Image (cartoon, rainbow, N blue to C red):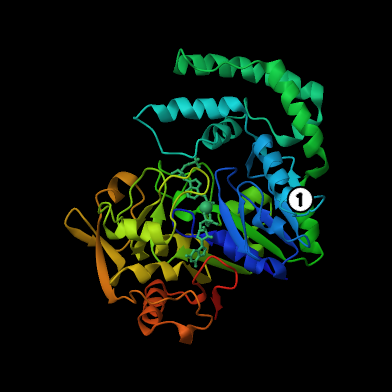
Amino acid sequence: MACTCVVGLQWGDEAKGKIVDLLSTEHQFVVRYNGGPNAGHTVVKNGKTYKLSLLPTGVLNPNLRAVIGNGLVINPVRFLEEVNTLRTAGVYIGDNLVLSDHAHLIFPYHVEEERLVELASEGAIGTTGRGIGPCYQDKVGRSNGIRVGELLYPDHFRHRLQAVVARKNLMLHALSADAKQFDANQLCDEYLGYAQQLRPHIADTTILLHRALDEGRGILFEAAQGSLLDIDHGTYPFVTSSNSSTTGIWSGSGVPARRLTRVIGVVKAYTTRVGKGPFPTELDDGPSGLGERIRQKGREFGTVTGRPRRCGWFDAVAVRHSARLGGVDELALMLLDVLSVVDEVKICTGYELEGKRIDYFPGDSFLLEKCKPTYETMSGWKNEDLTKARKLAELPAAARKYIDRLSAILGLPVTIVSVGPDREQTIMR
Ligand code: GDP
Ligand code: IMO
Ligand code: MG
């Protein structure tokens, strides 16, 4: 029985969506276990491009049950919008989509709180502005957290929301005299309206997944964000508010992580990052520099916010850290075709921190900020078109050497190489 996880090993946008879509036919369930509408996963198939944010990518395959686990934070407006967009595109969405009654609800006051905190230059993270952090804060804080299942009990829900909104209005006003204020009854009516549409999808997904395990069904876990954005093990505080490494599976779905049979770590052939925070190998070299060339060729603009992604060389120190953390068995190396715009390629194999060479990933952002990368330089494959290769042998020798070198440095096999966004543009080893 396959129990697979597809997890990003960098700062997100490693092309996890493409790999989940490729593997979805080998499983019966696909499960998101962390994050919320901050994710943006792209799938290109049969000439159509789909962008998924809150729903698991596997929902595109009608034979699978797509599960939104308890570890997520849900904005019902975004959920319903995404369902409608997919239905308009001809995708079947019915009882194949299941939403955990334990997942937490995002409210507009979460978005407002995040806006006010992010406006201040001190403490800004460069978030997606979707209310993710404040909602997780309320989950952990308990008194103000409201779960999806509570929507099904209108009197109880109204009672809870009245108490929470009264506190939220005070808190928001304390943050800024111009803060938006909210009407609990109005918000309650609005959310109870969404509840009618959500109702057919709501279930205890932990029970559902345990039954699936008992029946020997294949489960595919789809991580959101990247391991370097993990709340505990990433570049804190410039991270997201959930466990985006495989560490989040157990708590975010109720499936013990030891049930996993295969962990695929997804990496780009280079590195990108959206939002603030340290990025040792960043190519911050101006409008005609290599960073910009990679951004244009890789179309590196955020799926959710449209922000330009920061681009840089492959950081093997960072990836080794996330691969160990995630119990990764093998690597999917993505967007290799993009590196055809550079003369030579570089791999960061160590850092220099305060005059000393280190080969580990410092746990603190303020230390990582001081790290200078040390590189290995290899010949590139400039101007060669990789996008038509379907076998390793069809890749330029320099590209094959690059793959082998990454594999040797990281001590992991590269089992999938991607040379374009389409599902056909893939080399399976
Ligand atoms: P995710 O969040 O990890 O699912 O990744 P995103 O969807 O945010 O970003 C990956 C982008 O790269 C998407 O636009 C994909 O269509 C695109 N993509 C995926 N694989 C390849 C590839 O091998 N080459 C190129 N050029 N683009 C790719
Ligand atoms: P996928 O699943 C890339 C980043 C934001 C910001 C930080 C915190 O598509 O890989 P948040 O809104 O989560 O509180 O923002 O995390 N971030 C992502 N970066 N890909 C993502 O998701 C991201 N989700 C959040 O840019 O730096
Ligand atoms: Mg993305």
> Relative to 77, does residue 375 appear above or below in the rendering?
below
Q: Residue at x 42, y 30 (%)?
A: 118
| Residue hosting label 1 | 97
In the image: residue 62, left or right of residue 22: right
Mark 1 close to ligand 2, CB under 8 Å: no
For numbered disc 1, what is the local secondary structure?
strand
**Residue 159 visible from this viewpoint:** yes
> Relative to 344, does residue 318 appear above or below in the rendering?
above
In the image: residue 338, left or right of residue 101: left
> Where's the N terminus, which quadrant?
bottom right
Query: Residue 417, how many percent across, how many down?
Result: 50, 74
Number of marks in picture: 1
Q: Residue at x 78, y 62 (%)?
A: 63
> Where's the C terminus, which quadrant?
bottom right
Decide which of 379, 104 is in the foreground and name it: 379
> Relative to 245, does residue 331 appear above or below in the rendering?
below
The image quarter containing residue 352 is bottom left
Query: Residue 8, how many percent across, how many down?
Result: 51, 59
**Residue 318 visible from this viewpoint:** no
Query: Residue 276, how many percent across, how many down?
Result: 37, 43
Decide which of 143, 46 is in the foreground and name it: 46
Query: Residue 76, how many percent across, how many down?
Result: 69, 36
Residue farthest toward the bottom in the current orientation of the protein: 393
> Relative to 341, does residue 73 appear above or below in the rendering?
above
Callout 1: few (<14), some (14-19), or many (20+) C-alpha neighbours within 10 Å?
Answer: many
| Amino acid at circle 1 | Leu
Decide which of 222, 313 is in the foreground and name it: 313
Residue farthest toward the left in the current orientation of the protein: 355
Q: Residue at x 80, y 24 (%)?
A: 154
